[in-house]
Amino acid sequence: MPSYDYVCKACHKKFSVHLSISDHDKGKAKCPRCGSKRLEQRLTAFTAVTSKKS
């Protein structure tokens, strides 16, 4: 399940949340501090870990 980073526009808390892609697309994320859904998604680096050695 992907992790998404947000900043709440109401209380300015930065947080990460694990959501399925469909839940993310439906806007189901909310701030853990104040419960607001007025969020701004932050850009983050993506890293994939595989077991195959090159």
Image: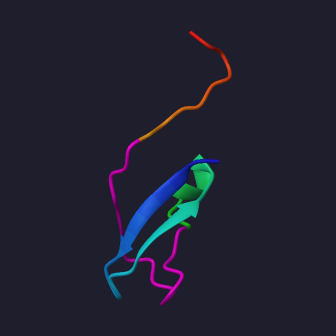
Number of residue marks: 0
- Considering only vertical position in the picture, is 45 above or below 25? above
**Residue 47 position in % (x across, y down):** 48, 37
Identify the main secondary structure in magenta: loop
The C terminus - image quarter: top right
Q: Residue furthest top?
A: 54
What residue do we see at 57% from left, 48% from top?
Answer: 2
What residue do we see at 54% from left, 53% from top?
Answer: 3
User: Which span is picked out in magenta?
Assistant: 29-45
Q: Residue furthest right?
A: 51
Residue 40 makes an appearance in the image = yes
Quick one: 21 or 11, which is closer to the camera?
11
Q: Residue furthest front?
A: 53
Quick one: 1 or 51, which is closer to the camera?
51
- Considering only vertical position in the picture, is 43 above or below 41? above
Left or right side of 31 for 21: right
**Residue 26 position in % (x across, y down):** 53, 59
> Would residue 39 be counted in the magenta stretch?
yes
Residue 25 makes an appearance in the image = no
What residue do we see at 35% from left, 88% from top?
Answer: 11
Q: Quadrant of residue 45?
A: top left
Color scheme of the displayed model: rainbow
Left or right side of 34 for 40: left
> Would residue 13 be counted in the magenta stretch?
no
- Considering only vertical position in the picture, is 10 above or below 30? below
- Considering only vertical position in the picture, is 52 above or below 45? above
What residue do we see at 34% from left, 59% from top?
Answer: 42
Left or right side of 51 for 36: left
